[in-house]
Each structure stands twice: as C-alpha cells, then as structure tokens.
C-alpha cells in the first residue's frame, strides 16, 4: 500500500471561510450523492470534482446530456458514443477497466429506454471486469433518477429492471470491485431508495419540494425544520456531510471549473432582423442551399460516431494511468484489535458533551469516520446495532457484563431487542431507573430520551411499551407514576409525570 498518503481535492470554499475539501480515498469507500433542483449547480459540481480528481483516479461518466464530452480535450477522457449495440458497450467497458482509461459515455440523442439499456450494459461491463483489474474508478452518474427511477415510468419494465439492477450493483456492491459511485439527482423522491441509501456522503443543493426536502433531511439525519435551509440555497451552494466531506453539515460554495459544459442554459438574444415580416416567410418556406441534409436524421449531422473498433483501438493506445492505488489499502486487524477499536470509537463519541443533541445518523457517521481512522475495515457495526450499543451505553449498562448469561440485564436486553430500534434507548433508561430505584422519569425526560420535545409522544411510547408487556405502569395516590419491569423485581420510585426535565438526559436515541 502507498502508506496512508491522503489525497484531498478542493471542491470550493466553505461559506464561513476556508477551503472545502474532499478526501478522495475516503470517497472511494463511501460514495457520494448530490441532490438539487434543476439549475442548482449539480453538473457544475460534478465537473469540478472530475477536473480536480482527474490526475488521481480513473473516471467513468454516465452522461445523459452530452455535457461532459468537453473533458476529452483538456483531460484526455475518451468519449464513448452510446449509439451502438449493448454487447459492444459491455466490451468497451471491460477494456476501459483493463486499460484504466477515463471515459465519458455520451447518451445524448437516445430515448429514455435506450439510455437505460446502454447505461446498464456499460455499467455491467465495468462491474463484471476480471478481479485482477479491480482498480479504483470514480463512476459519476448525472441525472441518476433516469437510470434508477423510484417508480415505473413510460419505459418497459425490462429496461427499468436492467438499469436499476446496474445502478444497484454500482452503489451496493461496487466498492469491493473498486467502483466508487458518485450520483446526482434533481429529485431525491424520484431516485430509487436503495440506490440513494448506499451513499454516505451528501451534497445537498437548492430543493423546493417538501417531499425531496423530507428525504434529504432523513438521509442527513437533520430534522425537517433544519432542512428548510435547502430551499434558500443559491445556485452553486451546497450543504456537505459525510466521512469524505465534513462531520457536521457544512455549507460550501463550489469553485470554478476549467472546461465548459457544452450545453449551456438558454440565453435570450436579440432576434436577427430577417426573423420577422416577409423575410421570415422566405426563410422557412424557401429551400436553402443545403436542403438535402435536412432529410438525413438530425443525429447524423453532428460529429460522426466512431466505430467500436476505433474506440477499442483508442482505449488500447491510452495505456494505464499514473498513481495506481490498490483497492484495499487497509491492513487487517485481529478480531480483538478490531473490537477494541470499535469500543474506543463508541466511547469517544459518548464522551463528547454534545452527543445527546446530535441525531443517531450523524453520530453514526462520526462513528464510521473514527473506525476508518483506526483502519477498522468492512462494516464495523450496522446502524441498528450501533443504535442499540449506544442505547445500552447511555443507560449506563456495561455491555460485556450485561451479555453475561446470568446477568439480569441479559433479559432486559432481550426485551429491548423486541422493540423498534428507536424505542430501545427509552426502555433501557426506564429499566435503569427501576434498577437504581430512582423516581420514574417524567414525560419531558422520556421525550428527551427519545429525541423529542412532545410529552404526548412520551405517553404514547410508554403506552406502547406497556402493550408490549415490557413495562408495567401504575400511579400512586398522588398521581405519581411508577414503572416496573415485569419478571424482574425492579420498580422505580414514584415520579411526577408532569415535572420538567431536570438534567439533560443523554440519550437522543430516536428521531422526532
Ligand atoms: N459554483 C458555481 N459557480 C459558477 N457557476 C455555476 C456554479 N454552479 C452552477 N453554475 C452555473 O449555473 C448554471 C446551472 O448549473 P448546472 O450545473 O447546469 O445545474 P444542474 O446540473 O443542477 O441543473 C450553469 O450555467 C452553471 O455554469
Ligand atoms: Mg445538470
């Protein structure tokens, strides 16, 4: 491995000052999702990312609008015109991996079904490459909702299936093969959920629709009110979050680019003089000198499509790129070292004073970053296992002790395991209060432990747990609540359900 030399590229500037950087090696492992309405600056952002990272990593761009073909002149990308058979595209993709050449798959001019089939064939070829050529490739897909739509559209089911399958492979199973997905979409709600969910890095741009905002908020672990900020973002401004970008949502302004988009947004220009009156009539009804050409399909008028043989020859000539970075650069830890590293990362997170006020997905991102810093390979803990561990720790329970067979806590953990993930922390906090014979937490405290401010929510939670028979509630003569854990002789002291929350309850184990 090339030690841990870190390659960072500059995306632009932080809104608050300073450079906004992206850790390229980290990106290869954790993928990126860019979201923003049309005109928010996604394609510009992708171009900036491609230009800055071109010297470091091989790139393949799935380009529905032929925007990125201009990378060819400046950075040497080979343009693959998608108007050819699927088998051809697949073979070309295999060669692309073999020769490690950066490419732009130009899908311009195809209808949506053809675009899906061509992208699927090409992505399939990249994905199915032989194991000995699993070098890292940044696979950038602009307008990803075209290839991984969340709902059936006007295209055939079959086209949708192959395209969605290829996108799912890229985002869910590509990493081991060196494929790092970077996808952009104008409508999060139109992008298949499983494809979006595999990215750990996000750049969120201007977003108008509530449904997209809600999904963006969920992915970022922000509450919906916070996500309102996406509505007011200017074009070119994004909020960054994720292990390769920032540990907290960070507003950034994307920097300038060296190449230009070929298709620029329409600009209003003064009309030529002949465009009105009799001149105009002549212009459209009188045959021009190059009339014959207008009978040829429009597509053929533009640059001729190079033959497959030409493209293959060009790929073979290009040769391998510099800076070959091995796919897996992480030395393996022993199981004990790994466990110790995971435990330490968890303890560090709990020790941070603001942990209680950060949502679980944000804490989880933080946890993954810390594990990666310690070179813990693979998936250290799933999100739901992480949530459980956090809940146990918040409740002041020693997990090793609790997992011992004769520990009464083992039973409590089993009961917790039968509850929805986000409720387990609240239940464990109640169990802990009962074990310690402390007064029963008030509604406000229960709500806070759940990451909510609503006492009504707290009462519904307790009622739900009672229904599931993991707690038994009763009131004493003065209306104070007592919670008992059935099967164990544990019971809280009476506590006023309407009391204000006193100390901060360190257990934001749910989302509101
Ligand atoms: N960070 C930026 N700096 C300068 N111009 C930008 C920036 N981001 C976007 N633009 C310009 O705004 C317009 C829309 O951007 P584009 O990337 O095409 O949006 P999208 O792909 O989201 O529809 C383009 O003309 C682009 O050049
Ligand atoms: Mg665009």
Image: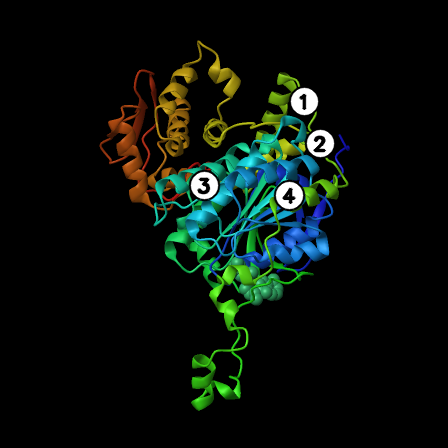
Mark earlier in primary sequence (4, 2): 4
Look at the image and tell me in which quarter the N terminus lies.
top right
**Disc 3 and disc 1 in contact, CB within 8 angstroms:** no
Instruction: Give the label, 4 or 2, closer to the camera.
Output: 4
Q: CA distance from mark 4 to mark 2?
A: 30 Å
User: x and y percent of residue 401 in the render?
Assistant: 51, 16
Q: Which mark is residue 332?
A: 1
Instruction: Give the label, 3 or 2, closer to the camera.
Output: 3
Instruction: Give the label, 4 or 3, closer to the camera.
Output: 4
User: x and y percent of residue 478 in the render?
Assistant: 24, 35
Instruction: Tell me if residue 38 comes above or below residue 375 in the rendering.
Output: below
Instruction: Give the label, 3 or 1, closer to the camera.
Output: 3
- Could you tell me which residue is drawn at 28 percent across and 34 percent down? 480
Tell me: 469 left or right of 24.
Answer: left
Q: CA distance from mark 1 to mark 2?
A: 15 Å
* Residue at the top extreme, as displayed: 406
Mark 2 crowd level (few <14, some 14–19, many ≥20, 10 Å Cα): few
> Element under label 1?
loop
Q: Which mark is residue 326?
A: 2
**Would residue 503 be seen by someone viewing this image from the given angle?**
no
Q: Which mark is residue 163?
A: 3
Work out whether residue 1 or residue 389 is closer to the camera in this orientation and state it.
1
Q: Which mark is residue 309?
A: 4
- Could you tell me which residue is drawn at 77 percent across and 33 percent down? 2
> Element under label 3?
helix
Can you tell me whether the CB of the residue at mark 2 lies under 8 Å from the nearest atom of ligand 2? no
Can you tell me whether the CB of the residue at mark 4 lies under 8 Å from the nearest atom of ligand 2? no
Q: CA distance from mark 3 to mark 2?
A: 28 Å
Mark earlier in primary sequence (3, 1): 3
Work out whether residue 431 or residue 178 is closer to the camera in this orientation and state it.
178
């Amino acid at each position: 491995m090339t030690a841990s030399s870190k390659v960072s590229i500059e995306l632009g500037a932080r809104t608050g000052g300073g450079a906004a950087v992206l850790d390229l090696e980290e990106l290869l492992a954790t993928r990126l999702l860019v979201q923003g309405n049309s005109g928010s600056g996604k394609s510009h952002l992708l171009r900036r990312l491609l230009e800055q990272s071109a010297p470091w990593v091989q790139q393949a761009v799935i380009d529905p609008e032929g925007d990125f073909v201009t990378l060819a002149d400046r950075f040497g990308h080979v343009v693959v015109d998608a108007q050819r058979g699927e088998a051809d595209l697949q073979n070309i993709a295999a060669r692309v991996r073999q020769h490690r050449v950066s490419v732009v798959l130009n899908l311009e001019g195809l209808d949506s079904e053809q675009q899906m089939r061509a992208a699927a064939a090409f992505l399939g070829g990249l994905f199915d490459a032989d194991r000995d050529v699993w070098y890292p490739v940044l696979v950038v897909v602009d307008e990803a909702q075209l290839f991984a739509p969340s709902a059936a559209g006007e295209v055939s089911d079959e086209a949708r299936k192959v395209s969605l399958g290829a996108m799912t492979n890229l985002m869910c199973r590509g990493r081991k093969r060196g494929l790092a997905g970077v996808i952009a979409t104008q409508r999060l709600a139109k992008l298949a959920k499983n494809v979006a969910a595999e990215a750990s890095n996000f750049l969120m741009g201007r977003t108008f629709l509530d449904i997209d905002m809600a999904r963006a908020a969920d992915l970022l672990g922000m509450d919906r009110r916070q996500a309102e900020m996406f509505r007011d973002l200017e074009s070119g401004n994004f909020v960054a979050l994720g292990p390769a970008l920032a540990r907290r949502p960070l507003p950034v302004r994307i920097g300038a680019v060296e190449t230009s988009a070929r298709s620029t947004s329409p600009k209003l220009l003064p009309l030529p003089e002949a465009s009105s009156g009799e001149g105009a009539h002549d212009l459209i009804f009188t045959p021009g000198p190059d009339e014959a050409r207008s009978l040829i399909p429009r597509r053929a008028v533009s640059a001729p499509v190079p033959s497959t043989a030409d493209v293959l020859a060009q790929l073979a000539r290009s040769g391998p790129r510099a800076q070959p970075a091995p796919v897996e650069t992480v030395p393996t830890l022993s199981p004990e070292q790994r466990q110790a590293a995971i435990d330490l990362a968890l303890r560090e997170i709990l020790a941070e004073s603001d942990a209680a006020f950060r949502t679980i997905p944000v804490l989880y991102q933080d946890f993954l970053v810390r594990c990666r810093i310690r070179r813990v390979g693979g998936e250290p803990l799933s999100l739901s296992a992480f949530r459980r561990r956090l809940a146990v720790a918040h409740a002041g329970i020693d997990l090793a002790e609790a997992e011992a067979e004769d520990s009464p806590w083992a039973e409590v953990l089993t009961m917790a395991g039968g509850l929805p993930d986000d409720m387990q922390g609240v239940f464990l906090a109640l169990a802990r209060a009962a074990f310690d014979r402390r007064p029963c937490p008030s509604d406000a405290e229960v709500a806070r432990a759940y990451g909510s401010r609503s006492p009504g929510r707290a009462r519904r939670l307790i009622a739900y747990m009672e229904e599931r028979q993991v707690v038994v509630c009763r009131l004493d003569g003065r209306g104070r609540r007592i919670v008992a854990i059935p099967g164990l002789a544990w019971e809280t002291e009476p506590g006023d359900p309407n009391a204000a929350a006193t100390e901060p309850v360190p257990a934001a184990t749910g989302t509101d």
